[in-house]
Amino acid sequence: MENSGTVRVEQIDAIALITLDRPEKHNALSQSMRDSLIRKLGELAADETVRVVVLTGAGKVSFCVGTDVSEFLGRSGLTQWERDIDPFRLFEVIERFPKPVLTMINGYAYGGGCELALACDIRISSTNSQFGQLEVNFGLIPGGGGTQRLTRLVGRGQAMRMILGGERIPASEAWRIGLVDLLVPPTDLWETTFSVARAIAERNPAAVRLAKEAIRSVDEMSLSAGLRYEASLMGICLYESGSEATISAFLGKKGGGEQST
């Protein structure tokens, strides 16, 4: 019986490391892996000891090459459509996850694997990685948010080039166009990723959550609406996150006086 893959979770202090473990298939996502990942994310969202999530792929060759296309066989177009419009499908669950999600990209990120990275908050990649929305090569288009999130992230022209051309680009090019946020040698990938994760985990969790919510709203609101939303979240943060005590302590160290942000 073919291995359908597993999803491993390891907690390192306040950081949860999620590993897509199917290296013999380049960590292609089976339906059982998707279901498992969604379930584990739900558990991590409720776990107050976890403040940051890091998502990666097993092995040194691939991060994730997307959906296990063998599962398309025998599936009707209507069935696929119903799966793709599900508001609780994997990509949207990751994007709406209340805690920061970093992705540690250690190889090929193709198709749904690239879309998986796009749904995360911060993308950190090794220099030996490659990226691509290759669906057009198979007579398909991206179905996990590639046309939408990639365009918002890198601009229409670059998204057109990647999606319509179905080409693979190296990590250096992905970093140049803004698809990758941090680019490091393979030997530094783990330490860099966890350094960023630890820095976030050390911050006030309520402030981090509200800041993420405010930033995520940019894609869905006008500037004026976004500014009002930011102001409302700032008010919540001020009185609900324990920041008053922090500000008082800061002013005490500075000898008092007014401070402005």
Image: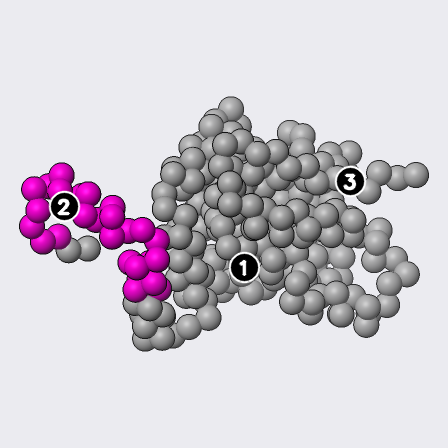
Q: Is 145 left or right of 240, judged from the image as shown? A: right
Residue identifier under label 2: 251
- Spatial CA span between label 2 and label 1: 35 Å
Residue 254: x and y, percent?
10, 41
Q: Say what amino acid the circle numbered 2 marks.
A: Leu
Instruction: For label 2, count other residues whose C-alpha is less than 10 Å away and answer few (under 14), some (14-19) or many (20+).
Output: some
Residue identifier under label 1: 96
> Which quarter of the rendering shows the N terminus?
top right
Q: Is 128 left or right of 202, judged from the image as shown? A: right
Q: Earlier in the sequence, mark 1 or mark 3?
A: 3
- Spatial CA span between label 1 and label 3: 24 Å
Look at the numbered disc 1 and give the secondary structure of its residue: loop
Q: Earlier in the sequence, mark 2 or mark 1?
A: 1
**For the residues carrying marks 1 and 3, which lies nearer the camera in this image?**
1
Q: Say what amino acid the circle numbered 1 marks.
A: Arg
Q: Residue at x 76, y 57 (%)?
A: 138
Q: Residue at x 73, y 52 (%)?
A: 35
Count the numbered circles shown. Answer: 3
In the image, the segment drawn in magenta is 233-259
Look at the numbered disc 2 and give the secondary structure of its residue: helix
Residue 239 on the magenta span: yes
Main secondary structure along the magenta-highlighted residues: helix
Residue 211: x and y, percent?
38, 56
Q: Residue at x 56, y 38 (%)?
A: 16
Residue 152 on the magenta span: no
Look at the numbered disc 3 and give the secondary structure of its residue: loop
**For the residues carrying marks 2 and 1, which lies nearer the camera in this image?**
2
